[in-house]
Image (tube, helix red, strand yellow):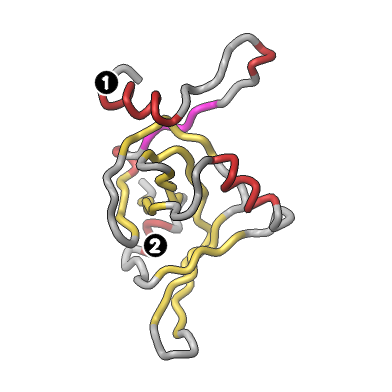
Amino acid sequence: MALNLVKLCVGVDSVEQLQGWLDRHDGQPTVHTTRMTPKRKDEILAGGSLYWVIKRVIQVRQPVLDLEEFTDPEGVKRCNIWLENKLVRTAPSPRRAFQGWRYLQSEDAPRDVKVQSAKTGNGKEPPPELGAKLAELGLL
């Protein structure tokens, strides 16, 4: 099973805002730079994703393409996390604030959800705050 990462999406208030940022990259892979390099690279590259925490709730994930360690001009080691330029919505999963990133086992990761158009009559996933509360109560 693949290993995943989870990270706070700082400065982003919604999945739509994150999507807008990705849209400006014309479908090209995106990169997120972090201070620490995951030591379990092979497990992550075996199909892992970066799960984004937006407003204290995991709401979306991006598949990881590569992890690239480098040294910046000041001599500090860093890691570029290369990500597919696509977001996959997940079931809301509340998370407390933390620094950096954390490993997330596949069996503990929120399931993917299909967001359907209101035009189909099937509705959409609940808003993140409601979804988080429902998940907390075991109702989602």
The secondary structure that dominates the magenta segment is loop
Q: Quadrant of residue 54?
A: top left
Q: Residue at x 44, y 55 (%)?
A: 10
Q: Residue at x 39, y 52 (%)?
A: 8
Amino acid type, residue under disc 2 in the picture: Asp
- Which label number is shown at residue 138? 1
> Secondary structure under badge 2?
helix
Amino acid type, residue under disc 1 in the picture: Gly
- Which label number is shown at residue 42? 2
Q: Residue at x 38, y 54 (%)?
A: 7
Query: Tag count in the figure?
Result: 2
Q: Quadrant of residue 56?
A: top left
Q: Residue at x 45, y 38 (%)?
A: 59
* Residue sitting nearer the eye, 103 or 32: 32
User: In the orientation shown, which residue stands out farthest toward the top?
Assistant: 121
User: Percent from the top left, x then y, of residue 29?
Assistant: 63, 59
The boundaries of the magenta stretch are 110-114
